[in-house]
Image: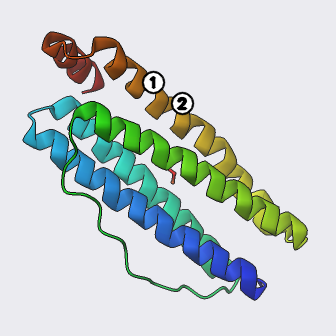
Amino acid sequence: MFSEEIENALNEQLNEEFFSWYTYLAMSSYFKTLNLDGFSRWMSKQAQREMMHAMKIYEFLHEREGGIMFRQINEPPPEWDSPLAAAELAYLHEQEASGRINRLVDLAMSDHAHATSTFLQWFVNEQVEEEARLRSIVKKLELIGEDRYGLFLIDRDMG
Ligand code: FEO
């Protein structure tokens, strides 16, 4: 059983994971329109990871007899100014996701919800990897600047 506050907070996070899935799918589509197939495939995989995160929370809520509250998923932008702008936004998005997970852990600990706190540790570790992956892409794109051949090479590597 969950306290009402934790049940609500987990459902909020469930919705955020769906929003992340939606956002990265939109980015994958954006990269496809630029013929950056490597970036597109990578973002599509990232979107799948977000769906997996959402389903982990969904299963956990069910396992502990929590309610599932389906909410409206916010609309992601249809395009970005550049591949770098998209990657920067994804990196920022992951940093914000880490902040939300940390606040959830704080809430679980202050509520002595040990099972929830233990469950969330997986997400804490996952966020370290997610941030590192996106930071690496941002740095590479910053490095090449306007060099289109450099972009071609990164796209090939990401594919
Ligand atoms: Fe579900 Fe990318 O954090």
Residue type beneath disc 1: Ser
Q: Is mark 1 on a helix, strand or loop?
A: helix
Image quadrant occupied by the N terminus? bottom right
Q: On the rendered structure, is 105 left or right of 41?
A: right
Q: Residue 81 carries which label?
A: none
The amino acid at mark 2 is Ala
Residue at left 55%, top 85%?
Answer: 68
Towards the viewer: 93 or 52: 93
Q: Is mark 2 within 8 Å of ligand 1?
A: no
Which picture quadrant has residue 39?
Answer: top left
Viewer-nearest residue: 104 or 123: 104
Callouts 2 and 1 close, C-beta under 8 Å? yes
Q: Position of residue 21 (x, y in %)?
A: 37, 58
CA separation in Å, label 2 and label 1:
6 Å
Asked if residue 93 is positioned above or below residue 67 in the image, the reply reads above
In the image: residue 69, left or right of residue 46: right
Task: Place residue 155 in its image quadrant.
Answer: top left
Residue 81 spot, x, y in % from top left: 20, 40
Question: Helix or strand or loop: what does disc 2 sit on?
Answer: helix
Residue at 14%, 11% (x, y): give it: 149
* Left or right position of 79 against 136: left
Q: Mark 1 points at which residue?
A: 136
Dot 2, crowdedness within 10 Å: few (<14), some or many (≥20)?
A: some
